[in-house]
Image: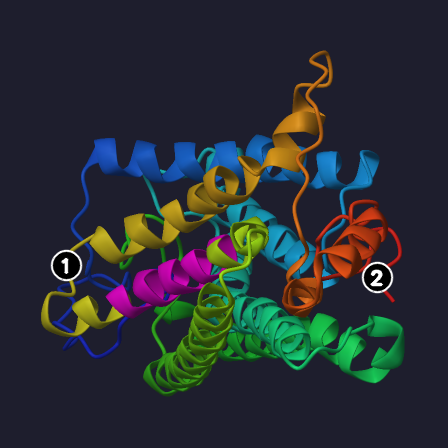
Amino acid sequence: MEALLPREADQPQPQAQSSVPHNIVHGTHAQLIFFLAVNVFTSHLGLPLLLLVIARRKIQRHGTFVNIIVAFMVMGFASSLLLYAGNITGPEPPKLLCLFQASLLYGYPALTSMSAFMLVLQMFFVIRASYQGQEMLDRDHTLRLWTMLMLPWFTFFISVLATAVIGSQNTDKISRNRRFFYCSVEALPLTNLIMTFAAFILICTFIIEVWTMYILYKRWSALRRQGSKLRWSMELNLPVRVLAFGLMIIFALSLSLLSIKTPETPVPDLAITCTALFIVIVFGTQTDVLRALCFWRKLPPRATLPIAYAKSLSTDAASDSSSQSSIDSRTWSWAPKFNNPV
């Protein structure tokens, strides 16, 4: 996050009689409290509660969605390490603790950008298959499924390991002072490589999102021309939320570019921190999640037509009626259940 990544593009200033790297980000105490409060709330309460509801209530979500939740929980815990140790202000934290936090946070751009890309890509696969009149089942794509689930964590651990090795060899470059909110390692080649990789993945994510929106628009236009009375029942709630999340994370990580011209601004760090809060709000307010949270209220199930079966709208009324009975029993999740991802 550079915003949760240090910007070595800033020109280092001479260090006057001190081995502590100079301060880059100029934040206030109120901004520090906000940064920690959002991270603690989302990683300790909001995201775990959302994950628990999905698991215990058997709400169908794809493994790539679960990956996103776990990724932001890990980053929230990592961002709170100095709070646990009581080192958010005052003297520099111990080098080992500082390096541990910096290593985890340097894995953030790779993990979150890859996880977001996989989530958007999974949605694209399902929407494209439905547009072609096919049903996509993960059991027919086992290798692809596990690649999508494991690749974000592989890139995360590579980034963490590289940061740990470089930091351990240059302990004088480790500090909390540079980035104000969290510890960092002053290593220009490493941060340039991490940011370049994340930027490439974000560009790919944006391309997939545009492609997906084009397919959705073509389907919507076709159904509108048919004048089917069921055209508005197409369940687009989750795809729209996923697309919004994808755009949000692209915007948040792209704010890192602010660090090039104005490296002292805390805006990128604060914006990226709010991404986890965005997830809690956007995905935690879906109808099935709210119904599970408000278990004491007996809310009637909402009948919607899965997008995977939207092509049935072009058939006659009798066909629609017969197919609807089988459709209503299936929750549109474009995915297998959380507890059975394959």
Which residue type carries mark 1?
A: Glu
Gap between marks 1 and 2 measured at Cα: 43 Å
In the visual, does 230 lie left or right of 332? left
Circle 1 residue:
264
Q: Quadrant of residue 10?
A: bottom left
Q: Residue at x 56, y 34 (%)?
A: 46
Mark 2: which secondary structure? loop
**Is 243 within the magenta?**
yes
**Amino acid at the residue labelled 2:** Pro
Report the span colored magenta. 241-255
Q: Mark 2 sits on what residue?
A: 341
Q: Earlier in the sequence, mark 1 or mark 2?
A: 1
Whole-percent x, y for residue 118 in the image? 60, 73
Q: How many marks?
A: 2
Report the colour scheme: rainbow
On the rendered image, what quadrant is the C terminus found in? bottom right
Residue 234 picture quarter: bottom right
Q: Residue at x 54, y 56 (%)?
A: 231
The location of residue 117, given as percent across then percent down, is 54, 73
Q: Is residue 63 above or below residue 302?
A: below
